[in-house]
Image: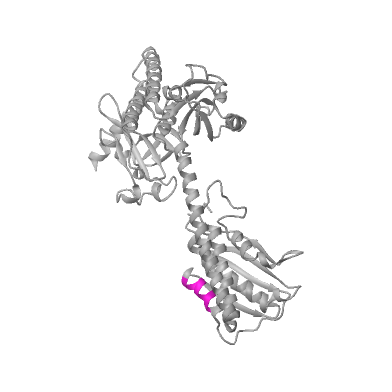
Amino acid sequence: MAEGRGLETDRAALLARYDLDTGGFATLDQITAFAAALCGTPIALVSIVEDDRQRFLARTGLDAEETPRDMSFCAHAMQGSGIFVVPDTAQNPDFRDNPLVTGAPFIRFYAGAPLIDGEGASLGALCVIDDRPRDGLTDVQRQGISLLARQVMVELEGRRRDRDVIARQQRDAQAVAESDRMFRTLADTMPQMVWSTLPDGYHDYYNARWYEFTGVPLGSTDGEGWNGMFHPEDQERAWERWRHSLKTGELYEIEYRLRHHSGDYRWTLGRALPIRDEEGAIARWIGTCTDINDQIAMVEEREVIAHELSHRIKNIFSVISGLIGLSARQHPEIRAAADDLRDRIMALGRAHDFVRPHGPNSQPDQDEGRLWGILEQIFAPYRDALGPRIRFSGDNPAIDDRSATPLALLFHELATNAAKYGALSVPSGGVAILVGREGEDIRIDWREEGGPPALPATHEGFGSRLMQLSIERQLGGRMTRDWRPEGLGLSLWIPARSMSRMPAGKG
């Protein structure tokens, strides 16, 4: 115990030499912004590991200023001399239960380069973080992170209290020049086009990749000349989005068509982050342009294939419905059952078309991926001149292909029964559906009003068994019925996880 306390005291003395409490880390802010852009991660940090905490001298994409040391990934990274990488924290027994993995910022990928001073002591790490697992860093990214970590130490070494003011100023000037040189060197090695602007948005730097891609003369797109490189149909939209980011300081992100040196326009993803000084004012913008033309072409090709596959599946539903109709004509005694079966198959067809994958060129008009959207399709036949006779209120939870089929069958049966025996069998009747969250379940209440009294069924028919199968077996929920004088009341409790695979908070 005494030895551990001595090590902590030595560490406190080591960090005290760097005058870290006076602020002024604008250069480090630029480094984290560039590290995030270089590695394509939403978060980059300069972390100093103290006795009982790690604090962030500079950060991009994270609001927290510090975390306890026992949660720190950088405390591990600083133990070695090379880059420490965790490709997937969820698969790593040392980190999968870490509160920073199970909670915000939900770390799945981590890479950190130790911050080592001239005497071999490690202060912490420069790290990049993603909320998705990754295979690792490319060779260029590893080299860049190592260089940036050394640049962080150049900045910190310049703050040591045992240096006189003149030496510090000289060192700072050299660090700025070296930082600028390294920035340009790293930017020219990146596969993306990199650009930089002044706080007012004036473009004053493009890397070599920009000029290779566009083929324009050096300096010809400085200032506002960049917008002329966009497709005429995209220019006003790009200007509007860029002005909004300059005004608000929000992330600049947009897809547009950029003129290639061949004369063709290629789809490109443009992104930019502001670099802020110690007072929070924007000191510079650093942006990238990434050629995504091939990815977009691939998405469009997949959409064509998905559309064709869906069309063929719908044809199968139509063929089956036709066969059922033909059988009913040949055997009139089964017409009633055949009609019910054909309606159920068509309900399945509507459910399939609703939740099938859609691309940007085939978005449906209805509320895709939501409960109300599929109910609108199922209940479309029950509209009259005054509008829909089945009305929804409350929440509109997400659904997916797994839940769409049982939900379509369930509500098709309810509407069919209401039209035959319940509230929809008389002109004045209607149905109210209320949807809400109840604990871990989605509760759905079906209330018929203005129709004949609801009478308990004397026996359980196929429709009732189908409803029970849909709710209990396929969705893992439960159902209750209330046979009321004013009409049937039915309540469903369906686990939210059975409605949609979408993570909580994103639906």
For residue 502: magenta? no
The percent position of residue 280, horizontal first and vertical second, equals 53, 29
Residue placed furthest toward the front? 330
Residue for point 39% across, 40% down: 129
Viewer-proximal residue among 139 and 217: 217
Position of 417 with respect to 74 (left or right) is right
Quadrant position of the N terminus in the picture: top left
Residue placed furthest toward the left? 3
Viewer-proximal residue among 60 and 53: 60
Q: Is residue 444 above or below residue 42?
A: below
Q: How is the image coloured?
A: one colour
Magenta segment: 465-473
Q: Quadrant of residue 138?
A: top left
The percent position of residue 197, horizontal first and vertical second, equals 52, 23
Viewer-proximal residue among 112 and 68: 112
Q: Is residue 314 above or below residue 459?
A: above
